[in-house]
Amino acid sequence: MKNYVISIIFIFISLIITPIATLSAEIDVNKTQKSTEVYKTDTTTEKSENTADTTENVITVFLNEKNENLTVSEFEYVCGSVAAEMPLMYHEEALKAQAIACYTNSLRLKSSTDKALTNGADISDNPSIHQGYITKEARKEKWGDDFNKYEAKLETAVKEVLGEYLTYEDEYCLCAFSAICTGTTESAENIWGEKIPYLVSVKSNGDTLSPAYSSTATFSKSQFISIMKDSGVAIDTKANLSDIIDKPKTSKAGTVLKIKINKKELTGEEIRNAFSLRSSAFKITTTENEVTFKVSGYGHGVGMSQYGADFMARQGSTYEEILKHYYKNAEIQK
């Protein structure tokens, strides 16, 4: 009789517990499915630890070489863009400043309706159009044995500032940056012909200490004449080069604004592009048979100098101080 009563009680308890256990299992399955959501590219489906629950937390990147779009979490995008744009041996505060610059640019472009250059994506990975981006797999290949060290440093820096961005008068900033300036950053007006209040010339003292600060490019007379011909400037092969290259007009940062060659006026950027120079801050010397460009800095020089940011960080500056120095009167929002 006693055993019979115990059996009845056991069956009764089982009837109560079984539905609860089943419901609990279903909840666990739903959680698992949600945490392993995938994002699709144009051709493949990819799992990601950094997926988000809404499209508001993702960024679609146009991968130029693959000619396809890739949608990733904001966290992964910022990691990949910082990895593409700044050396990971740079100071953590410089990496944070770069992360905020890259994130701000992605938000500005994501909100734009002009997607003509991006295959409908939010942003291109072509740095000559927008800014670079490399996937985690590409980072592994790039860093090799240093991957774990650099990836940990990268992710820590990005996590600390993810969600912070720069604005000026309540609009996303155009966060321009370049590798090395001349010791003074350039104004947007001098490079792109448009005044942008927060992209003005400021001192960047550390840049001149960079081992890559100066570079030279030398061309034979015949090479110079050929390249200038492609730029629409005809030069007689018998001409004395020193007689046809005028003294350039430069900015206070050293950028060549205008230069006349054989009476045709060109911008420093046009010369830079024609001869594949590292910047448009250059001086020209000539001999009877050669032309030499002595170049200062690397890049357009507008906005944040990456080498300068690293220098400031190593002198004790925070990422906030770095950003406020290079983007005048811009505000850091969260």
Image (cartoon, rainbow, N blue to C red):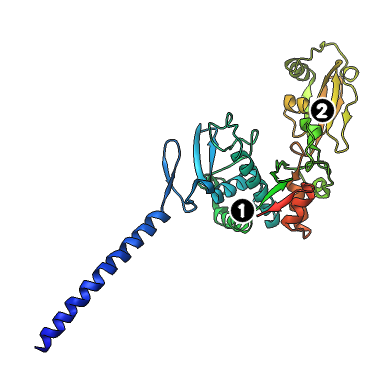
- Nearer to us of marks 1 and 2 is 1
Q: Position of residue 187 (x, y in %)?
A: 81, 38
For the point 55% across and 49% down, the residue is 74
Of 237 and 230, nearer the camera is: 230
Q: Farthest residue to the left: give it.
A: 1
Identify whether 68 is placed above or below 286.
Answer: below
Q: Position of residue 107 (x, y in %)?
A: 62, 44
For the point 90% across and 25% down, the residue is 247
Q: Tell me, for residue 292, which label it has, or none.
A: 2
Q: Where is residue 196 in the image (x, y as percent from the top left)?
A: 78, 38
In terms of secondary structure, where does tag 1 sit?
loop
Identify whether 134 is placed above or below 245.
Answer: below
Type of residue at label 2? Thr
Identify whether 122 is placed above or below 236.
Answer: below
In terms of secondary structure, where does tag 2 sit?
strand
Of 89 and 112, nearer the camera is: 112
Of 204 and 112, nearer the camera is: 112
125 sits left or right of 176 in the view: left
Q: In the rendered image, which quarter contains the C terminus?
A: bottom right
Residue 71 in view here: yes
87 sits left or right of 64 in the view: right
* Count of labels in the image: 2
* Residue at mark 1 to residue at mark 2: CA–CA distance: 46 Å
For the point 77% across and 24% down, the residue is 219
Type of residue at label 1? Gly
Residue at numbered disc 1: 163
Q: Position of residue 27 (x, y in %)?
A: 35, 62
For the point 88% across and 17% down, the residue is 244
Residue 280 in view here: no
- Kindly indicate the quadrant of the structure image that contains residue 231: top right
Q: Earlier along the polypeptide chain: callout 1 or callout 2?
A: 1
